Amino acid sequence: MTQSRFDPRRRAIVGAAAAAATSPFWFNIARAQNNAPIKIGFPTPLTGAFSAEAQDQSRAAELAIREFNESGGFNGRKAELLIRDDKLNAGEAATRTLELIEKDKVDFVVGSLSAATQLSINAVCRDRKIIFNSISQSDAINEAKDWSLYTFHEALNPHLTAGAVARYAFPKFGKNVVYLTADYAYGHEMVRGFQRAGAPLGVKTLADIRHPIGTADFSAFLPRIQALKPDVLVLCNFGRDLVNSAKQATDFGLKANTKIITPVLLYTSRLAGGADAFDGILGGTSYYWGMEDTIPAAKAFNDKFRKAYGGAVPSDYGALGYAGVRSVLQAVRDAKSTESIKVSIALRQLRYNWYKGEQFYRKCDHQSVQSVIIVESKSKDMKDKYDVFKTLAIEKPDERNLRSCDELGHKIST
């Protein structure tokens, strides 16, 4: 026998359910869900040859999280940074990224510090429609075969960086060039960038000498370089490799007749290598804290970093960690959502000046269009231990200095 629709016991059950639904208990559960943190995964090589740069990336990224939270977050939701060590290994980077997405349920991913690891991170994020904002140099990540609507590239790329250094250095120091190149994507792409920029200048490649990543002893390469008598030696390597090669080239006496340059003159490498080893070496960078004398955004960023970290100043790759996270969080606010496709649209429209001047993401490939700073290491007239570079020039943001959208395989040009 069925109960009547007017059965008082049924009415009591319905009434109790309705009361429960409006009770503080259920309200608090809903509110807790609405206030869940916005999680940003941050894979970076905390151990290995690039650990110093990765530590700076992490500190600056945490600063962006703190600023966002202190300014109210998004609809009451605060942000959280989940840092993972990718050990400078593509497989490890993919594994950690997959865990961040599937286990930790991150909303977005920012990070990487290698051309190789960022491609594996991007592949995992792309397949799962999670935004990845890369803060490491790569040409390949912007190419159509690796790209997606969820792929953004906050860092400079080798074509842009090497091109800016080439356009500044080759006319001043000579056309006969030797490259000492880390034998992986970063090194290869940097050499290509120098050669393409150097071709219309009549620059000649005498040799492209390649070494394994993590090389400690460069003594086997130096006699050959000296015998070639180049006008310019280009160190196309990174992190400890840059420190070791700069020290040993200096000790070997190569600077006597050859100008040494590098596409990315790392602030952290200069501190680690010292004034004598790097004296006179010229290179490019995405950021140098000394820009604060002329760029208000740099002064504001530096002051926040100093306050947070005991008076220290941010490095170039640290600044990229800050900008990569801050851009994503700003896009969340602009999109009024954490849904990947909505945030992607907001990022595409973003014009920002977080620390170095105006930037924007090119629509065809989501490459951040930005300035390249040309600096030279100095050993004299330093104000303090942080005052290690002289700013020689700033190449302003210009899409014409990037590879074209068509060359990258994108059918829609900007």
Image (tube, grey):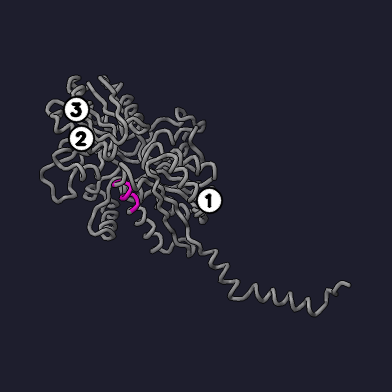
Q: Quadrant of residue 215?
A: top left
SS assignment at label 3: helix
Name the residue carrying label 3: 172
In this view, the residue farthest toward the right is 1
SS assignment at label 2: helix
Residue beneath the point at 65% across and 75% down: 20
Q: Which is more N-terminal, label 2 or label 3? A: 3
Q: Does the segment drawn in magenta span residue 56?
A: yes
Mark 3 against mark 2, which lies toward the viewer?
A: 2
In the image, what residue type sits under mark 1?
Glu
Nearer the observer, 103 or 261: 103
In the image, what residue type sits under mark 3?
Lys
SS assignment at label 1: helix
Name the residue carrying label 2: 246
Q: Does the segment drawn in magenta span residue 220?
A: no
Q: Is residue 153 left or right of residue 163?
A: right
Q: Position of residue 256 (x, y in %)?
A: 12, 28
* Magenta: main secondary structure: helix
Q: Quadrant of residue 234?
A: top left
Q: Is residue 384 left or right of residue 33?
A: left
Nearer the observer, 190 or 123: 123
Q: Which residues are magenta?
A: 52-58
Nearer the observer, 272 or 319: 272
Q: Quadrant of residue 182?
A: top left
Q: Which is more N-terminal, label 3 or label 1? A: 1
Q: Position of residue 316 (x, y in %)?
A: 29, 45
Cα distance, mark 1 to mark 3?
A: 52 Å
